[in-house]
Amino acid sequence: MSPVPAREATWAELLAHPEVTEHAELRSRFGLMAYHAGVEGGTFEVARDAAEAAGASLYAVTQPPLLRWHVASTLVDPSGSEMLGRFLDHVDVVVAVHGYGRLGRPRDILVGGGNRILAAHVSACLRTHAPGFSVIDDVEEIPRQLRGLHRANPVNRTAGGGVQLELPPAARGATPSPADAHLPCFPPAGIIAGVAEAARTWSGQPISNVPPERQ
């Protein structure tokens, strides 16, 4: 099968596509998101399974694997989705599960987002449950475009802010090749367990956001 490159789209275009589906399940005040499912294979499975295990809330957008429409996180706007708006109003903090792929970082998990106390908590849980990966939560060591610090990013729109979790293919049960986009993904159990523990044990500590000048 020929590789299918991801195509940039607007938020309105994506949600209007007849084969794209929004998912929202409101449970606890801790939220998990995966709105790039279909483009970043395995992210929906991680967010869905961790949310179910922890009793956390879930928001996701799924699309056929060969559609591969990508919307920049800064354009994922709750004003264009009543379902997303209700989700962000319901949760106090959120972890958005994303996927990335870089040759020099095959097993690096990047933990960005504005709430750095929550980032440290998520990182500690992942280090316990997924010791085969390197968990990086120093924002200075994360590539700028993967830090998730822009104020318009959905992870920074909740009352308590959130975390942008960037998983390499190995942590999503995916392969780096777009030619494999149609294949099912089976994320490692340790990744799901780590995210679930973070959601289940979060105690609502004080917010510690990265100053806007570092965004």
Image (cartoon, rainbow, N blue to C red):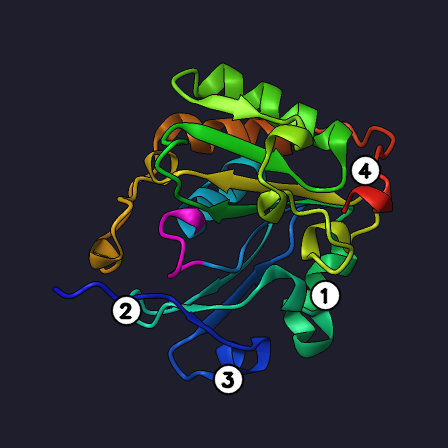
Q: Distance between the residues labelled 3 and 4?
A: 34 Å
Q: How crowded is mark 1: few (under 14 residues within 10 Å), some or many (20 or more)?
A: some
**Residue for badge 3:** 16
Res. 202 in view: yes
Task: Decide: is 133 above or below 175.
Answer: above
Q: Any mark on residue 86, and which?
A: 1
Q: Name the kind of residue labelled 4 in the image.
A: Val
**Which circle, 2 or 4, is nearer the viewer?**
4
Q: Predominant secondary structure in magenta? A: loop
Say whether disc 3 or disc 1 marks the residue closer to the N-terminus: 3
Question: SS class of the residue under badge 4?
Answer: loop
Q: Does the magenta stretch include residue 40?
A: yes
**Residue for badge 2:** 66
The residue lying furthest to the left in this view is 1
Q: Is residue 93 magenta?
A: no
Residue found at x 54% / y 43%? 51
